[in-house]
Image (tube, grey):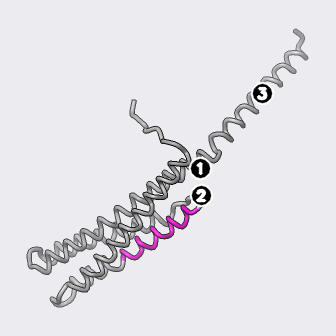
Amino acid sequence: MTTRQRCQHSRRCVAVVLVLGLAGLLTACGPAATRSDDVGALGSVSDHLDDASSAVATAELAVRERAAGHLPAVTADVAIGDAVETATGAVHGIGTLVIAADGAEQVRGDALDAASGAVGPVAAARTWLGRPPSPADDVLRALDDASSALDDASATVERAQAQIDAQTGPRAERTAP
């Protein structure tokens, strides 16, 4: 084989490798990969909704216990302060996610609305703590409404995940080696 033939052969091999690599890249980044990414993003939305729900439950418990006189104001304030941070973190987390699937962006938007709507009642619970003793009924009602909205948003996210899963087939679970 001459040097010229070796160069042509090498060029052909490089071209074939590049074409196969490009085909593999396009396959990995194609619609199935996008749907898988969307399921993962919706899983993150679900996790953030769980965080927001936990924040609401923490605030509700702290308000109930403080109203009953079973929890010092300082302890309740710390618990609700952490809950406010958790709720706002959930809003930020949901707000930064991008989901490409049809309809899934609306699901993310609804989840963002529910998480955002939870921050106000949790913060209001902290405000209630700083005021002279008063009935906690309004604060607890607002927290209950926020909890219901988060539960509805979580159910919607789960339905969207199931729909995307149905389109892509069952996902293989990752196992640690």
Q: Are marks 2 and 1 in contact (CB under 8 Å)?
A: yes
Question: Was residue 141 drawn as part of the magenta stretch in this picture?
Answer: no
Image marks 1 and 3: residues in contact by CB distance under 8 Å = no
Nearest to viewer (mark 1 / mark 3): 1
Q: CA distance from mark 1 to mark 3?
A: 26 Å
**Sequence-first disc among 2 and 1:** 1
Nearest the eye: 117 or 86: 117
The amino acid on which the numbered mark 1 sits, given as a three-letter code, is Thr
Residue beneath disc 1: 34
Decide: few, some or many residues near mark 2? Use Cα within 10 Å; few <14, some 14-19, many ≥20: few
Q: Give the main secondary structure, helix, strand or loop, of the magenta stretch.
A: helix
Q: Amino acid at mark 3?
A: Val
* Circle number at residue 100: 2
- Figure quadrant of residue 106: bottom right
Mark 3 or 2 closer to N-term?
3
> Where does label 3 land, which residue?
16
Which one is nearer the viewer's eye here, 147 or 48?
Answer: 147
The magenta segment: 103-119
Residue 27 is situated, as x and y percent measured from the top left of the image, at: 66, 39
